[in-house]
Image: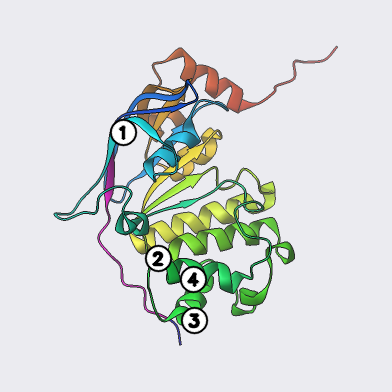
Amino acid sequence: MTATIVATPALGLHAEHLRVVYDGFVAVDDLSLNVAPGESFGIVGESGSGKSTVLRALCGLAPMAMGRVALTGAAKLPEPGSKAFRRRVQMVFQDPYGSLHPRQTVDRLLAEPLAIHGIGDAQARIEQALADVGLADGFRFRYPHQLSGGQRQRIAIARALILEPQILLLDEPTSALDASVQAEVLNLLEALRAQRSLSFILVSHDLAVVTHLCERLLVMHQGRPVEELAAADLAAHRVRADYTRSLMLASAGFRRDNAA
């Protein structure tokens, strides 16, 4: 018997004037964004531009020197940093090899967030979470080292979803995976978003991934916002900033000139 997942209304997220400083280094400077309920929003930029730091600031894992974060889309919403907020906003990290405890079975990895939040019916919920990410119940008692990279990332997604969040923060969710399984994980995320009315905030350096999964995106450079645009405009090369154009050229990859 599996647990019944009850679809909850989508929530959005609003952040304004975010500033994150580490030992005098400004990692994010005066960044604002607004993600509508049910929207898929992307953040792009080169390595070191502050993309992942933004996600960490949104969920309380990075210290904010300035700024405000709030959920939107309902009358009564939890405050950032509260236990209720963390249940509604979950994160999937970039590295499935590092985000799962190597000495814990999948069963224990999925049971832990349920225990922290005092949610019962653990066995049924674990079975349902595995089924939702396309894994059989037999994976429950395996250890991370017994899984492929794609399977580990599916477990990481299941761990985030088991609390039935309304917003998912995705930090380069496919960059550590082989090309052969990247599309499978992206298609899984897209299907889960539709089924559960999730809002996504996706960080990636891969413009193709962002235009495939997101409706709007924010371009960052050196911790600051450069421009915000629709994914359709990026795909059609309708951009304003020179930096965005340089990202597009870099994303196109190396093109060999005609050899002599």
Q: Which residue is mark 3?
A: 123
Q: Of residues 129 and 211, which is closer to you in this image? A: 129
The range drawn in magenta is 3-16
* Mark 4: amino acid: Ala
User: Does dot 3 land on a helix, a strand or a loop?
Assistant: helix
The image quadrant where one finds the C terminus is top right
Q: Which residue is mark 4?
A: 129
Q: Is residue 153 left or right of residue 127?
A: right
Q: Is residue 160 left or right of residue 152?
A: left
59 part of magenta stretch: no
- Disc 3 from disc 1: Cα separation: 38 Å
Q: Earlier in the sequence, mark 4 or mark 2?
A: 4
* Mark 3: amino acid: Gln
- Disc 4 from disc 2: Cα separation: 10 Å
- Disc 4 from disc 1: Cα separation: 30 Å
At a point 48% along the width and 29% down the height, the residue shown is: 50
Label 2 Cα neighbours within 10 Å, binned few <14 / some 14-19 / many ≥20: many
x and y percent of residue 72 in the render?
Answer: 22, 47
Q: Which residue is mark 2?
A: 163
Tell me the mark number nearer the camera, choosing from 1 and 2. Answer: 2
x and y percent of residue 176 in the render?
Answer: 65, 45
Main SS of the magenta part reads: loop
Tell me the mark number nearer the camera, choosing from 4 and 2. Answer: 2
At a point 59% along the width and 79% down the height, the residue shown is: 137
13 part of magenta stretch: yes
Q: Is residue 125 above or below residue 236?
A: below
* Mark 1: amino acid: Leu
Q: Which residue is mark 1?
A: 33
At a point 51% along the width and 78% down the height, the residue shown is: 127
* Mark 2: amino acid: Leu
User: Does dot 2 land on a helix, a strand or a loop?
Assistant: loop
Q: Earlier in the sequence, mark 1 or mark 2?
A: 1
